[in-house]
Image: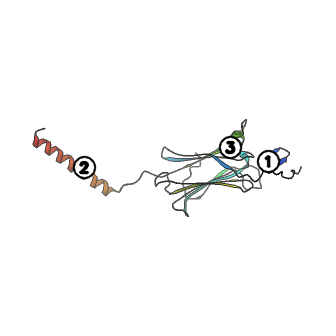
Amino acid sequence: MKPAPPTEAGVVEVRSGVTVINVPPQFSGFRIATQDGLNYIDVVVSDYNSWADIFRVEVKIQGDAVNPVADVAFQQYPDNATLQPQPQFQEAVGSFLVRSLSSATYNTQPLTVPERTEMRVTFVMSPVNGKFLSVTTTDLAGLEAFAEVEYSAGFLGRLPTVSGWILGVFALGATVLLVAVRIRRDRLGE
């Protein structure tokens, strides 16, 4: 059965329900957390038609505004024409993705609108340093949602490193200060 022509509101009636066209996916939530030395990037994305209309969610961590140091993605279908789900995580740049812990979840028995439209994709990554994190979500029609955040160095990476000689100088200075205080106390009879 052919769909009816679109109405002014951009709604097309099809055999299985109502499809909204020309409406891009959107972000419903976004969270970054560090646990057990790993970074968890949770992206909740929704599409008016259904979570099943979400084609791809991609996360890039960039060292500057141009060059990614990490590029990971979850893709629900092999292409936007083959509608047989073959979900997989991919890593185009870097080797930070922990595939065994990464996941994509949705409600299999939806009752509410958010349960019908939202998908949560969790990327679990080993520590990676960068300056920008961007998320791009694409639906089956090729429409996109894009978000980018800037963060300070180490936000998604390891703790700041301090070179050994700086630690040595600090330890020596602290030792000299403690010895000087003790000598002074001994002289004053305290």
**Is residue 130 found left or right of 73 in the rendered image?**
left
- Disc on the earlier residue, 1 or 3: 1
**Is residue 67 found left or right of 114 in the rendered image?**
left
Residue 135: x percent and y percent? 61, 53
- Residue at image location 28% in from the left, 54% down from the top: 168
Which of these two is toward me, 2 or 122?
2
- Disc on the earlier residue, 2 or 1: 1
Residue 8: x percent and y percent? 82, 51
Cα gap from disc 2 to disc 1, whole angstroms = 69 Å
Picture layout, residue 81 above or below residue 116: below
Which numbered circle lies on residue 118? 3
Cα gap from disc 1 to disc 3, whole angstroms = 16 Å
**Is residue 177 found left or right of 104 in the rendered image?**
left
Residue, disc 2:
174
**Quarter-of-image position of residue 17:** top right
Residue, disc 1:
19
Amino acid type of disc 2? Answer: Ala
Amino acid type of disc 3? Answer: Glu
* 1 and 3 marks in contact (CB < 8 Å): no
**Quarter-of-image position of residue 146:** bottom right
Amino acid type of disc 1? Answer: Thr
- Residue at image location 22% in from the left, 49% down from the top: 175
Numbered marks: total: 3
